Image (cartoon, rainbow, N blue to C red):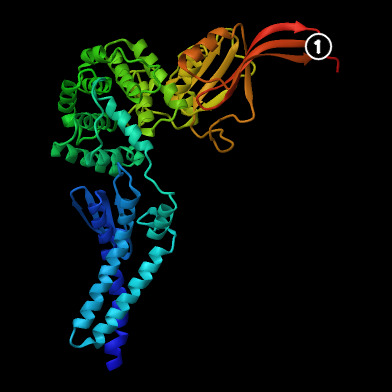
Amino acid sequence: MNFLSSFLIPFPAGLVGGWIVGLIFHEGGHWLAAALVSFQAREVIIGTGPTLVSQRIGETHLQWRRWPVSGLVLTYPIPDFHRGRYGLYLMGGLLGNIVFITLLIWTAMAAPDRSALEAAAVGAITSQIAFVLGQLIPKQATIAGVKVENDGLQLWRLARGRISWPQANQKAFDAMRRRYRAPQAPEQPLTRASMRILFHLSRVDRWADERVRRETHAAFLRELDRGDLQQDEELLVLDVLITDGLLFADPELRPRLDEWSQQACARAPDSKNLRWTRGGVLVELGRFSEARILLDDILIGDADEMNARFGSLFLARAEAAGGNVEKARRIANQLYVWARFNPCDPAIKALIERTRAEISRGRDVTGKNGEIMSGRNPVAPIADPAARAASHSTGAAPKGGFAALTPELDVSSLDESLWFWRDLLGFEIAYDRPAARFAYLQRGPLQVMLCERNGRWETGGMERPFGRGVNFQMTVESLAPILAALEKAGWPLFEKPSEAWYRVGDREEGQREFLVQDPDGYLLRFAENLGERAPTQTP
């Protein structure tokens, strides 16, 4: 019993307790060392698994998780990377463990009855030796969902000169700040607040993750409340908050958009970025005439300016509200093509597609709840095949009668496909059945049917590009009008125009042809007849 109470219980208790307390000393050592070398800790995490306790001290987020077996300290970007200071930050954790071991030895030696205490101390010291060795052996691990290098691996890389802080994001941040300064204004130094803003702007997951987005907004609001931002940084933060409020319809931000945009424009009236977001706010307020005046000089072709695209989106809405539907459609269609063939965040792409549908010319538009909108009157989609076939129709049979062979293409969005086939390829709607999401198109002798996917007659998986292994050749009098429309819209070709001659019996038939894919990927080949000639080669 004496052996049980003096060793078997104290020693394992010391192992477990020592590991947990040593973990706190280790991560606390990193945190303290970061402060001593002027690094900003953004997260101090003890344990893995679900978060049990969470607290913010300044801009440092402290977390205690369910299983205290490992920990992590993360810093904000470092403006002036220095190997010595970074090495001290890395050694801070190990120095914390050494301090803890020293306290254990001193406590055990100072106790009057040292038998049980010594056993507990030996267990705790053993755990610390294992902990330190585990940190010194270079390796990678995943802690709290973050893939990290342990202290030993980072110290090894630092000693070999293979660790540094990336400067690319800082250069991009400098370029962003420059947009909110007068051309002759001097460069501003990077501050601790600059590094915090840079970190939050670099979090690309904020576009798709509402939780991360709200964390970013809260951090930016705290920066504004402190009142110590440089002017270009303050304007940048305001512009980001306004943009997110417009893009995501954030109910917490929207009440302050007008105030923020007026404040920002008053401080930098020549900033294009701020004018674009101000125009978006005016559209949201229903002040369309003011918005058109402010946004009308935006150049759609400036592919380097994301904010120009964003402002153009609100310009399209303002033009539609003012009755200039054709201009609104043109802007919206250009934005749609840009978003389709360029890297674009899904949230922005969705907003472009929604706006494009809203300003369509009285055609079917998808409503908020997925219903079909024909003009102002909602038309519920029909599920029954027989009812779809017998549903209300407009138009008439194609001129010259029905072709003997007419392909029917299942499409993802009838509105998108109609814009492409009608506005770019020059087809016309002979007749349609709006509730069935069906349209019969004609261009001279060419005929094609489009039907929005409903699950019927699908013989296999439908993944873009649709229609794999087939191309639809269509002969037209001239390729020029179609090519001009595609080029104006920015729609890419699958294969550029070329001259082709095909052996037909004892003659060769010639055509000038190009290939293009429709919005769903169906491959279309347009040809212009070049006549016939004698074979150039003998078989």
Q: Measuring 26% from the left and 13% from the top, which residue is drawn there? A: 292
Note whether 59 is above or below 429 in the view shown: below
- Residue for point 26% across, 70% down: 100
Kindly tell me whether residue 10 is visible in this rendering: no
Q: Pick the residue in front: 460 or 498.
A: 498
Q: Around disc 1, counting alpha carbons within 10 Å, would you say few (fewer than 14), some (14 to 19), or many (20 or more)?
A: few
Residue under numbered circle 1: 536
Q: Residue at x 43, y 23 (%)?
A: 338
- Judge from the rendering whether residue 210 lies leftward or rightward of residue 235; answer left or right: right
- Percent x, y for residue 27? 28, 60
User: Compared with residue 109, is residue 463 higher up or lower down, i.e. above or below?
Assistant: above
Total labels drawn: 1
Above or below for 25 versus 481? below
Relative height, residue 440 to residue 187 (above, below): above
Q: Position of residue 232 (x, y in %)?
A: 22, 29
Q: Nearer the viewer, residue 492 or 503?
A: 492
Residue 121 x/y as whole percent:
27, 79
Does residue 246 appear left or right of residue 145 in this picture?
left
Q: Among all residues in the image, which is located at the extreme right?
A: 539
Is residue 238 or residue 388 the one in the foreground?
Answer: 238
Question: In the image, residue 304 lies at what x, y percent?
Answer: 39, 23
What amino acid type should be assigned to the residue bearing mark 1? Thr
Q: Residue 527's quadrant in the figure? A: top right
Pick the quarter of the image with the C terminus: top right
Per the image, label 1 sits on a secondary structure element best described as loop
The answer to which of 105 and 373 lies nearer the viewer is 105
Which residue corresponds to the image point at 16% horizontal and 30% vertical from the top-left? 256
Quarter of the figure that contains the N terminus: bottom left
